[in-house]
Image: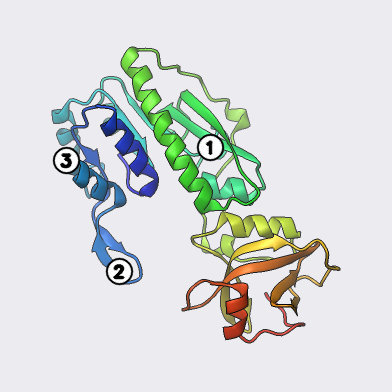
Amino acid sequence: MGTPDFAVPSLESLVQHGYEIPAVVTTPDRPRGRGREVLPSPVKRRAAELGVPVLQPPSLKAPEFAGQLRNLSPDILAVVAFRILPKNIYSIPRFGSFNLHASLLPRYRGAAPIQRAIMNGEELTGLTTFFLEEEVDTGAVILQKAVPIAEEDDAGSLHDRLSVLGAALVLETVRLVEEGNAPRIPQDASMATPAPKVLKGDCHIRWNQPARSVRNLIRALSPAPGAYTRHGGRVIKVYRAEMARDLQDLPAGEVLLEGGSLFVGTAESVLSLAELQQEGRRRLPVEEFLRGYRLRSGDRLE
């Protein structure tokens, strides 16, 4: 069970290593992209290329869907970036169901573990496979793998790395279940931290925060949905920024243009903005952005 690009390597790995996959379950086709064209999920596209049957239930609670799964008599259900499953679904396989989560559980339980880890300035994250239980992200841990977060990582680069490493963890988890050797390590609930879904309000850059915190926010929201600021009522998204250690401090939100660079003050130190996007335009390196957007030293970003 899976939907986005993150889940594709796990599907490929299981097929390549000879496991019989009687069906892939993914979300119904829906409008995607700027043109809102109705398209299949990345997992459905890859499953079709691999010749694996696809189920797209409009509701996971529909009795017909549970019946379809029972008829398949699955040994195990591997869930990667899908929806919350009702108990009558995840309890169907005879060896249970497990999920791949992009954090070292119990830290960063929730919908946005990659973004929240970067946002909080973490230097280490990881992957966890765990058996599904009724409460989300709380089941017994099977395997974990720690993964460093590099200073230059954004959510996109970390997502891609975790996706590939996660496929190996999914494969090893299935092997352990097959052999009857899968661990069941209880999570310590006292160590749990949340990773709630990113909302629009989370994406607004607040320049009265320290420069490193602002940069972490920008990294965490790149390439999507993008951190944003406002200038004269217009929205500008910022996708990349670097610390500008050689400059004297500027007032929070104040702009300095110098030698084709765009500097902005924060509560502590200065940021150099490297990649931006005016509303309705494409992403641009700062030099190109400044050629097409009127901004002056002393202006304020809000």
User: Which scheme is used to colour this image of the protein?
Assistant: rainbow
Residue 255: give x, y in percent of width and height. Answer: 74, 77
Regarding mark 1 in the picture, which secondary structure is present there? loop
Q: Which residue is mark 2?
A: 36
Residue 131: give x, y in percent of width and height. Answer: 40, 26
- Residue found 29% across the figure and 28% down from its top: 17
- Residue found 53% across the figure and 44% down from its top: 113
Q: Of the residues under marks 1 and 3, which one precedes in the sequence? A: 3
- Residue found 15% across the figure and 34% down from its top: 67
Other residues around mark 1 within 10 Å, as few (<14) / some (14–19) / many (≥20): many
Amino acid at pointer 3: Pro
Left or right: 272 as drawn, with respect to 51: right
Marker disc for residue 103: 1
Q: Is residue 293 above or below residue 44?
A: below
- Residue found 54% across the figure and 35% down from its top: 126
Quarter of the image for residue 203 reads: bottom right
Left or right: 163 as drawn, with respect to 55: right
Marker disc for residue 53: 3
